[in-house]
């Protein structure tokens, strides 16, 4: 059985596997954040691992489940477990206002207008996201919930959010930046509608006070996350900074 593993004093990580376009195998992390108010779950993985995710959440919370599900964004591999969570505990689901229409089923990611030619190709292979969940709570950037400060990080999707845990000095950054084979990378162009805005979001992250960078794809970068993020935004497009240095 898959289990959450403690990364910082208040944040635990669960890694799940999925296939992009049913071809390429990827891994994605979901996060459980402990606070005085209870547990907040950030993202919930793809539909095919929903059962394993619910079991892991149940074990980590002694069966109580999360008090809220906060979505970094609504892509297939980040929000696919929502239906299973609703059946298990029916927790409130919250997202940035620009992301809500995609989770509610009013808009489709593949139909976002983009000047990025790679995104057009990627949209042909993109897994559909027919979540059709009507009651989504809107959460605004700058607000704090469950010990987390909300940060708007658009570019990969319109309403992607990051979550700064000020006590643990850790940022859960969704797909704003990736750790691919030990190297930091901008989000993949095939799934990022506006790479320029996405790069600006990385730049905004460097303005925050944190040490630990916790991406959805790739291992956490402990202690040196902000320093390496600085190096990433200063490099020419296409080059990557390495957490191993």
Image (cartoon, helix red, strand yellow):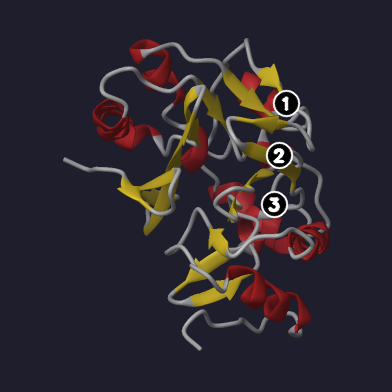
Label located before the other in sequence (1 or 3) = 1
Q: Is residue 174 above or below residue 56?
A: below
- Badge 1 crowding class, 10 Å Cα cut-off, few under 14, some 14 to 19, many 20 or more, is some
Label located before the other in sequence (2 or 3) = 2
Of marks 2 and 3, the one in the foreground = 2
The residue carrying mark 2 is 150
Quadrant into which the N terminus falls: top left
Q: Quadrant of residue 51?
A: top left
Q: Regarding mark 1 in the picture, which secondary structure is present there?
A: loop
Q: Circles 1 and 3: CB distance less than 8 Å?
A: no
Relative to 126, 52 lies left or right: left
Label located before the other in sequence (2 or 1) = 1
Q: Residue at x 71, y 45 (%)?
A: 157
Of marks 1 and 3, the one in the foreground = 1
Q: What distance separates the C-alpha of mark 2 from that of mark 1?
A: 8 Å
Q: x, y percentage for residue 234? A: 77, 81
The residue carrying mark 3 is 156
Q: What distance separates the C-alpha of mark 1 from that of mark 3?
A: 18 Å
């Amino acid at each position: 059985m898959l289990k959450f593993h403690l990364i910082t004093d208040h944040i635990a990580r669960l890694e799940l596997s999925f296939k992009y376009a049913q071809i390429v195998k990827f891994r994605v992390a979901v996060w459980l954040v402990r606070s005085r108010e209870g547990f907040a779950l950030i993202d919930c993985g793809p539909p095919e691992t929903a059962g394993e995710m619910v079991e892991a959440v149940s074990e980590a919370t002694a069966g109580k489940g999360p008090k809220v599900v906060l979505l970094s964004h609504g892509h297939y591999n980040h929000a696919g477990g929502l239906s299973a969570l609703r059946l298990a505990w029916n927790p409130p689901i919250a997202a940035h206002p620009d992301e809500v229409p995609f989770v509610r089923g009013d808009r489709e990611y593949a139909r976002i207008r983009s000047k990025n030619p790679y995104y057009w190709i990627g949209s042909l292979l993109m897994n559909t996201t027919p979540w059709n969940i009507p009651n989504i709570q809107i959460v605004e950037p700058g607000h704090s919930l469950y010990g987390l400060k909300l940060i708007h990080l658009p570019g990969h999707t319109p309403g992607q959010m990051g979550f700064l845990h000020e006590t643990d000095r850790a940022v859960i950054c969704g797909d704003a930046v990736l750790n691919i084979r030990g190297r930091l990378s901008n989000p993949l162009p095939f799934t990022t509608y506006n790479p320029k805005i996405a790069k600006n979001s990385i730049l905004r992250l460097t303005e925050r006070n944190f040490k630990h960078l916790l991406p959805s794809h790739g291992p956490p970068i402990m202690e040196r996350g902000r320093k390496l993020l600085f190096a990433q935004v200063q490099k020419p497009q296409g080059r990557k900074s390495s957490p191993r240095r």
